[in-house]
């Protein structure tokens, strides 16, 4: 345990940790400080935190209602102005208000899909890559079947079967999102399977489950994290695609993707209707990408050695 | 060593057996994948709450016509019987007639698939040719200005809605500047001057020496292909950068530098070659994604490809067309996977089975 | 941690940097050069050829080219330009009929026998002569095949068993048609102008007959007609090409070729039109229309069509079947605002079930947005606090926009409406199974006679679940024996003035009591480049005649 002579910082960065807990905390601290050093990663974190705050305080921030305000006859398709910062849409609703309220939906979709799809893909990929043989073949065939479908079409089919709605859309997107993670995890696992230290751990008597869980998975995590963060934008856009094809977030819900989809008719003259949510999606995915990058650089054990 | 013939013969037989087993396993696996694909499409088709008869007879048909057509389509049979018929049709290569186009599905696919193939191939080519070098440079010059630029370009490509970008690109490059041709694959003027042999218009026009038409087709192709290429490049450059970073952090790079190898050789001959292993999967995946047909791009550019075809058929519960389209897409995908798996084993000795 | 730099590394870095940069530079230059060379074609020449009319239209609804089977709007226009029939109506005044293939006709005293005398010397595009044999065959074929549009003919009492006696040739130039009742002659003749009564080339069609299908399998993707244009090529969802038919008996088509390009997006159609890559764009949204109108090279033409858009209330629902609720909801739609914004240029507010242009249509518009009145009615029905309801909405415009607007005006009286989005076929499937609460959709006239809409809005002969006929009134479970009798009487009324009166009364009845909130009548609008002459939109889908168009 730390003694009074050391400060917290000295304790965490000590080259000779006295306990496993100290070692783990020390590694976490090292990762954190690497992360903080990376200015772009901090920018990403800042954007995501901003998104969270906007989502939480949406009611306070938005000057109008996202759904009920708006006069069809007088306020339709107005350009950005002092009263309407981002203009109004084709039903006369304030776009800024809709963006702010839509941030909640965006967060909901992105978090849920990541939380469902990534662990599933990771598990299937690592097990498949490590076990090899029949298990690998079967799991990869199942992965292939899901991958062989155009993602949008498969999601469309699921939503069509489950019924429209944002929750079903999330489930559908999650179901179609895990295969690439599985493939990537498997690719990494295949390369690592015969590495020396894995052999060493196996010789020490570790069971396959333990090897997969404690040794291989952490090495695959960073690649999967990169892919997941890269996918964040794609997930939001897939949700928009679903909305465009008629399923997904139900109107008048201010889901960003659906806003782009419905603003697309006006993109030539009233560009702000589609541009505003487009920019919002862009900033958010930029944030996720920067964050993911920063996390990767902070977490990669190999990079830690340098 | 003991007289080699018996042992060597035994070893050879063992190897042949192993190869034969491998081939059988491969065939079984492929068959199972197809079966799985068929089951999923069939299931989706029956679960979707759309009446397939509607697409054929329309909304105005009197009840007895609807009932008659339903009977003719075999929709009143029990579900497992329908599935068996479905599989039987697939095996015999007869995917039936599309209810939406009144053509045999295979004829339809022979028409739409080359359009997507043309677009996806050119797009992936652009994406790879631009993406890999950019990714390598970004990794090598990590943290530098160039690195940031490459990442930003990639990020933009990854976050902007493709249909918005497509429409804007059309507006700028076609409507205002006139640098490229508009939506569609070929101008009406040349529409009937080229006989479609492969269906890939670039090749067809070149083969027939119709150079004006060739230029016209290229003019139509370049914008959507660049759009897809941009998105592909964004992804490929990121993954290349990531894989290269991993490689450049390995011990052998330090060793190679210590040995005095030039930086160029290290990067391009050694690190990149190792990064190619997972990169090949990525490129294959990217190609497959583009091949599955980007529905949104095809909509904006009025490109009559596979993505639009499958989506339209699905929404109208035209299961014959969906079946045919899915089998084709699935086959392509399985083929690409196999190719990348093979390349894996060729490029990375570590993955070869002991 | 940043890597420590050694002086040797610095040199190496510089070398590799310039190497890679050179490689990159070379690659970029090469690529750019290739692109520039390849696209150095004279793009300005992208205008349409002088002898071809090019239209941009969403033609993905075409599924067959057989007139006895085809029922879609786009196909309807193609048929109208490529197939002849016994009679047609005047595009300028649809109440006037003239003989197409028929030179003259007569109706018997008892009103049940129609005799047609054909024009002599007519030929099909294939060269085969057009005689009474082909006319009788075509009508018999349509009835025997009994596909979607066949009811237009079978409703005169024709069936597979009797059609060969009821429709027969007397000699090479005379055809006789017998109906089961003495219908209004305008009704029968109007039905004969429809595409299902198109004359097909018997010899050519039977040459391709398979398994007794009367050539249906072949004619789905081929052509066997005699109209001013012939179908040259059809690639589904891509392109449809027409060519001048030099065997046509009347005035030859002005242009040798007409091409329909399938373009789904309004924005894309607009770009093509502005650039001159198409001559006519048919699916422009109100906003694109407004923008295109400002263009000096483009003019707008429009025509009210026989299609009306409505919201219907399922009478199986306990709340929606209350008469006060039905009326209240009609007061909760902001017709004016919708008319000025969402459907501007592509529709006009209309509240009766007969679209203007049909015989007997009236233009009364008693309803407007009146939240107070609606609330009063709801209170009378015991629903002071409103209620919750769902609406199935297709995700296409302008229907989706109208649904959202209506959602907000309903809410002002406490009605909470949830929108269930779906694609066209999904919502339709649910509607036909009577599983909806509210439905928003459209209905187009099948033939140019008021009975086409009366038949579906005001008739419900059998409200049970197994009914043989399922008109819109049935789909909404509206049980109306009285109105059905009135509609039946109107179609048999041979005095035209009296017929008009009867339909006026029917429309007023429905305005008061029906579960249909009728919102607007479709106006078809097209953007046309100024060098295109004589492009006139018809009242029905099959009366837009592209063979009359010329370019200068």
Image (cartoon, rainbow, N blue to C red):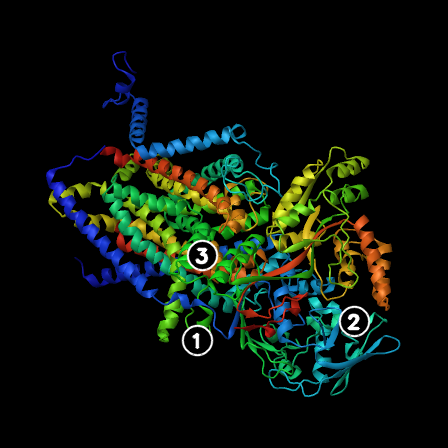
Discs 3, 1: same chain: yes
Residue C188 is tagged as 2
Q: Position of residue A110 (x, y in %)?
A: 47, 39
- Would you call the spot at circle 2 few (<14 residues within 10 Å), some (14-19), or many (20 or more)? some
Q: Secondary structure at mark 1?
A: loop
Q: Position of residue C72 (x, y in %)?
A: 64, 64
In depth, the one of C550 and C506 nearer the eye is C550
Q: Are marks 3 and 1 in contact (CB under 8 Å)?
A: no
Subunit that carries the residue with mark 2: C
From the viewer's perspective, tell me whether residue B239 is left or right of residue A67: left
Judge depth for marks 3 and 2 and give the one in front: 2
Q: Are marks 3 and 2 in contact (CB under 8 Å)?
A: no
**Which of the marked residues, 3 or 1, is nearer the chain's N terminus?**
1
Can you name the residue that lies furthest to the top here? A4
Residue B193 is tagged as 1
Discs 3, 2: same chain: no
Compute the Cα span from label 1 to label 2.
46 Å
Subunit that carries the residue with mark 3: B
Q: Can you say whether C406 is above or below A22 in the image?
A: below
Image quarter of residue C182: bottom right
Q: Secondary structure at mark 2?
A: helix
In this figure, which residue is indicated by the disc labeled 3?
Answer: B292
Say which quadrant the C terminus of chain A sits in: top left
């Amino acid at each position: 345990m730390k003694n009074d002579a050391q400060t917290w910082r000295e304790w965490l960065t000590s080259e000779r940790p006295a306990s496993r807990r100290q070692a783990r905390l020390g590694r976490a601290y090292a990762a954190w400080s690497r992360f903080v050093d990376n200015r772009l990663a901090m920018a990403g974190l800042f954007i995501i935190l901003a998104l969270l705050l906007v989502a939480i305080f949406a009611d306070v921030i938005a000057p109008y209602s996202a759904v009920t305000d708006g006069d069809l006859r007088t306020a339709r398709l107005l350009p950005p102005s002092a009263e309407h910062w981002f203009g109004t849409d084709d039903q006369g609703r304030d776009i800024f208000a809709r963006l702010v309220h839509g941030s909640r939906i965006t967060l909901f979709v992105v978090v849920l899909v990541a939380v469902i799809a990534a662990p599933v893909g990771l598990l299937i990929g690592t097990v498949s890559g490590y076990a090899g043989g029949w298990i690998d073949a079967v799991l990869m065939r199942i992965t292939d079947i899901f991958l062989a479908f155009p993602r949008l079409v498969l999601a469309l089919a699921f939503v069509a079967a489950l019924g429209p709605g944002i929750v079903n859309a999330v489930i559908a997107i999650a179901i179609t999102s895990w295969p690439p993670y599985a493939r990537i995890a498997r690719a990494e696992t295949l390369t690592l399977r015969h590495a020396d230290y894995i052999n060493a751990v196996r010789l020490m008597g570790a069971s396959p489950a333990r090897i997969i869980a404690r040794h291989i998975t952490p090495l695959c995590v960073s690649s999967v994290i990169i892919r997941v963060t890269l996918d964040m934008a794609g997930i939001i856009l897939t949700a928009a695609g679903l909305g465009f094809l008629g399923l997904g977030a139900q109107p008048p819900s201010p889901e960003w993707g659906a806003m782009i989809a419905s603003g697309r008719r006006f993109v030539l003259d009233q560009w702000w209707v589609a541009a505003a949510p487009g920019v919002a999606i862009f900033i958010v995915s930029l944030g996720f990408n920067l964050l993911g990058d920063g996390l990767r650089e902070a977490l990669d054990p190999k990079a830690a050695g340098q | 060593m003991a007289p080699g013939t018996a042992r060597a013969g035994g070893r050879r037989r063992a190897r042949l057996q192993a190869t034969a087993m491998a081939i059988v396993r491969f065939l079984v696996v492929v068959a199972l994948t197809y079966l799985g694909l068929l089951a999923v499409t069939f299931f989706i088709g029956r679960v979707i709450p759309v009446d397939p008869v509607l697409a054929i007879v329309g909304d105005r048909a009197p009840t007895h016509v609807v009932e008659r057509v339903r009977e003719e389509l075999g929709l009143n049979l029990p579900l497992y019987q329908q599935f068996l018929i479905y599989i039987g049709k697939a095996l015999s290569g007869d995917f039936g007639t599309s209810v939406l186009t009144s053509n045999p599905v295979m004829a339809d696919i022979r028409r739409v698939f080359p359009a997507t193939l043309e677009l996806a191939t050119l797009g992936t080519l652009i994406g790879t040719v631009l993406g890999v070098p950019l990714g390598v440079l970004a990794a090598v010059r990590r943290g530098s200005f160039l690195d940031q630029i490459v990442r930003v370009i990639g990020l933009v490509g990854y976050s902007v809605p493709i249909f918005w970008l497509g429409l804007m690109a059309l507006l700028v490059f076609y409507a205002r500047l006139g640098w490229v041709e508009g939506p569609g694959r070929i101008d009406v003027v040349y529409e009937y001057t080229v006989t479609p042999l492969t269906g890939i218009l670039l090749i067809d026009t070149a083969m027939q020496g119709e150079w004006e038409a060739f230029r016209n087709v290229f003019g139509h192709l370049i914008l959507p292909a660049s759009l897809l290429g941009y998105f592909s490049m964004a992804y490929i450059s990121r993954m290349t950068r990531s894989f290269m970073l991993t490689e450049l952090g390995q011990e052998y790079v330090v060793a190679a530098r210590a040995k005095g190898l030039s930086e160029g050789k290290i990067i391009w001959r050694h690190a990149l070659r190792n990064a190619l292993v997972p990169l090949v999967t990525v490129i294959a995946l990217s190609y497959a994604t583009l091949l599955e047909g980007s529905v949104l791009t095809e909509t904006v550019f009025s490109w009559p490809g596979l993505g639009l075809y499958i989506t339209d058929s699905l929404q109208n519960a035209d299961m014959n067309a969906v079946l045919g389209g899915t089998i084709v897409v699935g086959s392509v995908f399985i083929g690409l996977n196999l190719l990348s798996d093979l390349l894996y084993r060729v490029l990375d000795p570590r993955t070869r089975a002991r | 941690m940043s890597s420590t730099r050694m002086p040797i590394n610095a040199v190496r870095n510089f070398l590799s940097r310039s190497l890679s940069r050179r490689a990159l530079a070379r690659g970029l230059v090469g690529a750019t050069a290739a692109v520039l060379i390849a696209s150095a074609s004279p793009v300005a020449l992208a205008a349409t050829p002088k002898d071809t009319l090019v239209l941009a239209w969403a033609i993905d609804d075409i599924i067959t080219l057989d007139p006895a089977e085809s029922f879609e709007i786009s196909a309807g226009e193609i048929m109208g330009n490529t197939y002849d029939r016994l009679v047609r109506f005047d595009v300028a005044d649809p109440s006037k009929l003239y003989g197409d293939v028929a030179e003259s006709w007569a109706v018997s005293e008892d009103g049940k026998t129609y005799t047609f005398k054909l024009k002599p010397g007519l030929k099909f595009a294939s060269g085969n002569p057009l005689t009474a044999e082909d006319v009788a065959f075509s009508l018999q074929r349509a009835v025997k095949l009994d596909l979607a549009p066949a009811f237009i003919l079978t409703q005169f009492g024709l069936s597979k068993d009797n059609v060969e006696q009821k429709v027969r040739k007397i000699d090479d130039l005379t055809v006789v048609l017998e109906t089961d009742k003495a219908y209004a002659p305008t009704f029968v003749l109007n039905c004969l102008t429809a595409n299902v009564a198109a004359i097909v080339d018997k010899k050519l069609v039977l040459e391709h007959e398979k398994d007794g299908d009367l050539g249906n399998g072949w004619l789905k993707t081929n052509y066997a007609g005699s109209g001013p244009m012939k179908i040259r090529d059809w690639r589904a969802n891509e392109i449809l090409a027409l060519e001048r038919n030099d065997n046509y008996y009347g005035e030859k088509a002005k242009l040798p070729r007409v091409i329909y390009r399938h373009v789904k997006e309004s924005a894309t159609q607009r770009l093509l039109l502005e650039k001159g890559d198409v001559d006519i764009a048919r699916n422009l949204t109100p906003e694109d229309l407004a923008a295109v109108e400002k263009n000096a090279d483009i003019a707008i033409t429009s025509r009210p069509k026989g299609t009306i858009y409505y919201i219907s209330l399922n009478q199986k629902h306990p709340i929606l079947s209350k008469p006060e609720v039905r009326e209240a909801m009609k007061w909760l739609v902001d017709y004016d605002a919708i008319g000025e914004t969402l459907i501007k240029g592509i529709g006009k507010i209309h509240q009766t079930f007969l679209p203007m242009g049909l015989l007997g249509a009236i233009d009364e518009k008693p309803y407007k947005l009146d939240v107070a009145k609606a609330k009063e009615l709801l209170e009378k029905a015991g629903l002071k606090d409103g209620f919750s309801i769902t609406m199935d909405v297709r995700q296409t415009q302008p229907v989706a926009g109208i649904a959202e607007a209506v959602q907000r005006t309903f809410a002002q009286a406490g009605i909470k409406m949830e929108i269930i989005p779906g694609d066209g076929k999904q919502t339709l499937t649910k509607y036909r199974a009577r599983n909806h609460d509210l439905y928003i959709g459209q209905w187009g006239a099948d033939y140019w006679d008021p009975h086409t809409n009366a038949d579906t809005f005001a008739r419900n002969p059998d409200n049970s679940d197994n009914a043989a006929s399922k008109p819109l009134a049935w789909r909404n479970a509206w049980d109306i024996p009285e109105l059905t009798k009135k509609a039946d009487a109107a179609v048999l009324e041979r005095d035209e003035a009296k017929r008009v009166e009867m339909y006026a009364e029917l429309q007023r009845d429905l305005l008061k009591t029906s579960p249909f909130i009728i919102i607007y009548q479709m106006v078809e609008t097209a953007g046309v480049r100024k060098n295109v002459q004589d492009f006139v939109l018809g009242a029905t889908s099959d009366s837009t005649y592209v063979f009359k168009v010329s370019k200068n």
